[in-house]
């Protein structure tokens, strides 16, 4: 039998406003740990739950492992007793809010893998009690909160919007962004019902500077996949322009720089060796997959994915052409990649196109090394290697240097002075005029 909605809801809202509610953050990665720290900084008691015993131990010791979190902030909230971490859900029944920040990958057929969401939701269902808020932050296809989570949570007899509250508030983490953080990035929130939305707004407004309510959890899910699809499509557009400019003998960077001087009606996007990170390579395919349920084909999304996935092979093909001008074959040549992180000045190499370039070069018979002080070792996508030191001797020994990530701590003057040939996929050498450099 359901409890009276108003007293249950009002009690939780008041606890949130007094910051007496206890918060659980499930998944302590790039999304979960910064969120946990922000909640603790304003006085909430927060429990981090993660299946990784190593991560849990680090949090318990106040040892930071996410670049977007300040070391002193994590140490402070741990030392003040505001943060603890565990691998167990045993404490979850005593928590007032449970925020889910677990991975939502795609399988090899580009089908959403919601096994982590389902597993965590079942754990929550086993301890769910009246008066709790459950909020999913993991990026997923529209309908996940309503169609996957809600039935699992309601299987024990409690009802969303009456006994407990259910919401979706998509993460908007931009790793390495020093201007926009968890606190000052606008937060979209959608509830399963008006009661859930009211509770979720009360929760997020205690930490986030600007909270944007939408009509449903499904609408909130659509917001996130649209944001990343927008970026994927526009990056694909400039990548396709790059392929055409290559055929026409035009400098795509010159074309783009001139185009972006227009003060209206255009937004800067730049080409590269592909797209990386957890969001852009994956999230648009959630929407593409879901659309099939409605007998709808998302042509722009499919084409954008095709163009962006083609770029690593294009880089390797162009590398072969550069070597040919020096009367060398790709097979047997020494190639040095500069950067394997998916983004400048970041240690994250998830879905990095540089890994695909690395693998294709190896398959073509090249002897490949990489330099990236942000990523001292890689073991992913069938590629295992350690970063090498960037020296004059190593540059001179390489038949070709490929700039795959534009890190600001690389001495590109040294690279241009001593490399035999350079393929620059990021326009990192724009301030150096040299016949050695070939742009993407």
Image: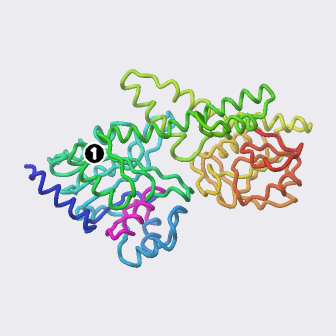
Out of 184 and 63, give the one closest to the viewer.
184
Residue 65 higher or lower than 311, as above or below: below
In the rendered structure, the answer to whether residue 141 lies left or right of residue 160 reads right
Residue drawn at x 59%, y 36% as measured from the top left: 264
Which residue is the site of mark 1? 191
* Residue 301 versus residue 164 in the image, above or below: above
Residue 203 placement (x, y as % from top left): 29, 57
| Residue, far bottom | 79
- State which quadrant residue 378 falls in: bottom right
Where residue 54 appears, as percent x and y from the top left, is 47, 66
Identify the residue shown where x is 45% and y is 30%.
Answer: 288
Q: Which of 368/4 is in front?
A: 4
Crowding around mark 1 (Cα neighbors within 10 Å: few <14, some 14 to 19, many 20+) is many
Position of residue 198 measured from the top left corner of the image (x, y, whole percent): 24, 50
Disc 1 element: strand
Locate residue 361: give its quadrant.
top right
| Image: magenta residue range | 30-53
Residue at screen point 60% across, 35% down: 266
Q: Is residue 415 left or right of residue 221?
A: right
On screen, residue 40 versus residue 150, left or right, reads right
430 to the left or right of 378: right
In this view, which residue lies farthest toward the front? 263
* Magenta span contains residue 51: yes
* Picture residue at 44% right of the left edge, 69% below the top: 59
Does 314 appear above or below 387? Answer: above
- Decide whether residue 271 is among the magenta residues: no
Residue 393 found in image quarter: bottom right
> Of residues 81 and 262, which is closer to you in this image?
262
Total labels drawn: 1
């Amino acid at each position: 039998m359901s409890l009276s909605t108003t007293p249950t809801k009002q009690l939780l809202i008041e606890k949130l406003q007094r910051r007496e509610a206890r918060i659980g953050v499930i998944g302590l990665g790039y999304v979960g740990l910064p969120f946990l720290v922000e909640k603790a900084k304003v006085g909430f008691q927060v429990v981090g739950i993660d299946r990784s015993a190593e991560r849990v131990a680090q949090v318990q010791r106040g040892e930071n492992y996410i670049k977007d979190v300040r070391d002193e902030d994590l140490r402070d909230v741990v030392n003040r007793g505001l943060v603890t971490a565990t691998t167990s859900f045993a404490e979850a029944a005593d928590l007032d809010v449970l925020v889910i920040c677990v991975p939502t990958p795609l399988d090899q057929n580009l089908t959403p893998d919601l096994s982590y969401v389902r597993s965590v939701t079942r754990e929550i269902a086993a301890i769910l009690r009246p008066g709790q808020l459950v909020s999913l932050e993991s990026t997923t296809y529209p309908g996940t909160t309503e169609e996957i989570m809600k039935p699992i949570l309601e299987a024990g007899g409690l009802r969303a919007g009456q006994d407990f509250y259910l919401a979706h508030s998509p993460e908007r983490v931009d790793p390495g962004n020093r201007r926009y953080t968890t606190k000052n990035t606008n937060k979209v929130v959608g509830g399963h019902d008006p009661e859930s939305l009211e509770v979720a707004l009360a929760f997020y407004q205690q930490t986030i500077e600007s909270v944007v309510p939408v009509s449903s959890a499904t609408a909130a899910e659509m917001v996130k996949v649209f944001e990343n699809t927008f970026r994927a499509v526009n990056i694909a557009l400039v990548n396709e322009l790059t392929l055409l400019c290559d055929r026409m003998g035009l400098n795509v960077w010159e074309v783009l720089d001139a185009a972006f001087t227009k003060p209206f009606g255009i937004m800067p996007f730049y080409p590269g060796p592909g797209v990386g990170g957890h969001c852009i390579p994956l999230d648009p395919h959630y929407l593409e997959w879901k659309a099939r349920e409605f007998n709808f084909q998302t042509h722009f999304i499919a084409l954008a994915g095709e163009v962006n996935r083609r770029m690593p092979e294009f880089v390797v093909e162009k590398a072969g052409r550069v070597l040919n001008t020096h009367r060398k074959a790709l097979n047997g040549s020494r190639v040095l990649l500069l950067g394997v992180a998916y983004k400048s000045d970041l240690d994250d190499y998830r879905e990095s196109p540089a890994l695909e370039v690395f693998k294709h070069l190896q398959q073509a018979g090249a002897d490949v090394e990489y330099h990236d002080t942000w990523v001292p070792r890689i073991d992913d996508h069938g590629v295992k290697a350690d970063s090498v030191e960037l020296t004059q001797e190593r540059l001179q020994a390489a038949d070709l240097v490929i700039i795959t990530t534009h890190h600001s701590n690389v001495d590109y003057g040294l690279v241009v002075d001593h490399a035999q040939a350079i393929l620059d996929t990021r326009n990192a050498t724009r301030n150096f005029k040299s016949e050695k450099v070939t742009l993407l």
